[in-house]
Image (cartoon, rainbow, N blue to C red):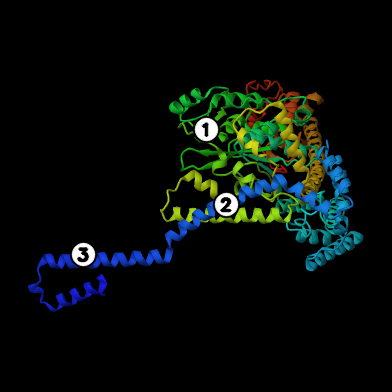
Amino acid sequence: NCTPFTVEVEIFVKFSCIPATELSQSGMTRLRQSISIRTVKYFLRLANYLFAPKLLGALLLRHGAALVVVATAFRIWLLLAHRVRSLLRVIGGWSFYIEYVQAKDARRRAKNYKEWLIYSAKLDRLEGLERWKQTASKKHEKHKQVLQNMKTLQNLLQEKDLFKLMWFLRKKVTRSLPGSSEDYHVLHTGGTKKIRERSLSLTAEALRAVCRLESPDITAADKLEFFSHLRHTFGRSCLCLSGGATLGLYHVGVVKALFTAGMLPRVISGASVGSIVTAIICTRKKHQLEDLFSNRTEITLEFFKKDGLLDKLRRVASEGAFLDLDSLQKCIRANVPDITFEEAHDLTGMVPNIVVTSRDSHDNSMVCNFLSTPNVLVWSAALCSCALPGMYKPATLYAKNRSGEIVKYDESDVTWIDGSIYMDIPTERLAQLFNVRYRIVSQVNPHVVSFLEGRRAWLPQRILLKSVQYLAREIREIYLGLTALSLLPNHKYITQLIEQGYKGDCTIRPKVGLFEFLKLFRNPTQDQYNQCVAEGQREAWKYIGEIMSHTNIERVLDECVRHLLAQTSHAATKSMESKAKRKIRSSRDKLSSTGTKKVDRASCDRNEAQREIKLAVISGDTGEVKSSQMGPRKLSWSVEEFLRNMEQYNVDPDFGSLEDDMMLKQPTLPTSRSLADIGKYRLKRAASAESL
């Protein structure tokens, strides 16, 4: 009945009684080996008992099977949910059932947001949700805080005390403003309770009052500083477009809904197919977008080359890719002009961001925009962001040099692949570069879109969805734990796809049918394109109320900054003009007092004006508000105004020494350069609203 360990101990005790001289060297070696082996075995048994790898493997298999079953049940429920709900309502004797179905069908056929909103309000009335909108919140403390803030704001507005009003708003205007982030999933219209909507409206009214009211102690410059700091603290919003192959056509509908509602953010990011939509939207002016969304301008949809299976297998053998990258490049270049990120920003006022991933794991991912990669061509970044490993070969980034020629961005032949592998939603990078605090995400990734909760989900649907999310999270954690212990192979792409986040503060998830997953890598038809745009637009309409509430304060702050900036710029311009006139008069007095011959007054005025232009551009003392196509932006001196003044006064663009006879050479600008390449003529942007 003795275990091997007790036998080993007895042998060891017997050997210990024997003198060392009588024990052979081979016997000692065998003894040490036997004890070491037994020790390792018992440590392995202890680890097996504590970590239970067999149980963990069984749990992983069972959870995987459960995930498949529950996910299948969830998809079946989505297909049958409306029928089950209608049947229960008929059995329950719901009196307004026919009217409800008619209103829902009419809303599904709505052509614009106004029509959709009318039928959504009717659905709210039929379900009795208008009463919920008028009643107080269940969270009494938060409701009490909202009422207290509203009462304080009303008193301050009546007193017209500018200093106290600014003091109160600086404390209360934040992204966590009470009433700005709750209960947007209850109503069909996407709104929230009346008390919270009134609170946000009153806050916007107070901000406009600060901009409008005057006080002898607070100047326009003080108010401009106040609003600039407040805007920086509040942050800005952005739109993030995910990957998803041909499912990315839904992004066009989401962008169209936000554009027509006047709530399209200036900062837009895209990865994979989202980068193509970002490139198309951010390289067009406002009237071009109107033509695009009204179908007066069409998008080229030939993304994939029409070849046979044998050609694709040959391509896999030669290039390691299933699809042709050149066909995708032709399609993208047909939709996106040859302009850089900085040129696109100057042309439209938009801020495109495209995520690319380096094939070399040391560099990981990069967000291309007018700050990090100003000279990179937008279409080349979109091409690199779509190069999914296995489907496309890695692509190369291209840029414009100083002569306007297209060259490689990196001479070391670095290649880039799909941006959504490492960073589908570049949350941290956008927050660092553009102070983004509110993210509107349009999510159509095939492995994500089926597991996101939509608006107004029924209880069985929520239970199934939570079960799917729980099982997926469990499998994810087990996989990451096993890879950390090196018990499973750690593939960098799979790990990054699992670890990254796919949701935002407002996640728009269009309804995707099962058969659409079979068409991920097929060229869409025009009918399919129109259908996806309409569906994406209808889904985005559900979130318009929420987006409006979260971005209304941001738009009011921008409006106040532009208004005050125009005031201060006008005052600075008038001050500079009076200063120039005084200099002209003093120079005339000096010339007349020295007895010099009479000087041409026009020439003198021209000389002084030229010097003032030079000083103004160098010092950045003056400023003008430039209204871009997608929203006003502030420059210390616009390129067009600067060149126009140079032509009027014959100013040398290199700012050389000024001749006495004012016969300087005309400015010569290379025709191959765009506005973005005239960087040396923008000497300063000190008064820029973007730099405040």
Instruction: Give the camera-side residue of 90 and 19.
Output: 90
Per the model, the C-alpha gap separating discs 1 and 3 is: 54 Å
The amino acid marked with disc number 1 is: Met
Q: Tag 1, which secondary structure?
A: loop
**Are there few (<14), some (14-19), or many (20+) residues within 10 Å of tag 3?**
few
Q: Residue at x 44, y 48 (%)?
A: 490
Above/below status of 157 relative to 110: below
Q: Secondary structure at mark 3?
A: helix
Which residue is labeled 1 in the image? 391
Question: Is 378 on the left-hand or right-hand side of 92?
Answer: left
- In the picture of the structure, the residue carrying the numbered disc 3 is 33
Q: Secondary structure at mark 2?
A: helix
Position in image of residue 270 (x %, y %): 63, 39
Query: From the viewer's perspective, is residue 598 above or below residue 422?
Result: above
Residue density around tag 1, few if under 14, some if 14–19, many if 20 or more, within 10 Å: some
Amino acid carrying mark 3 in the image: Gln
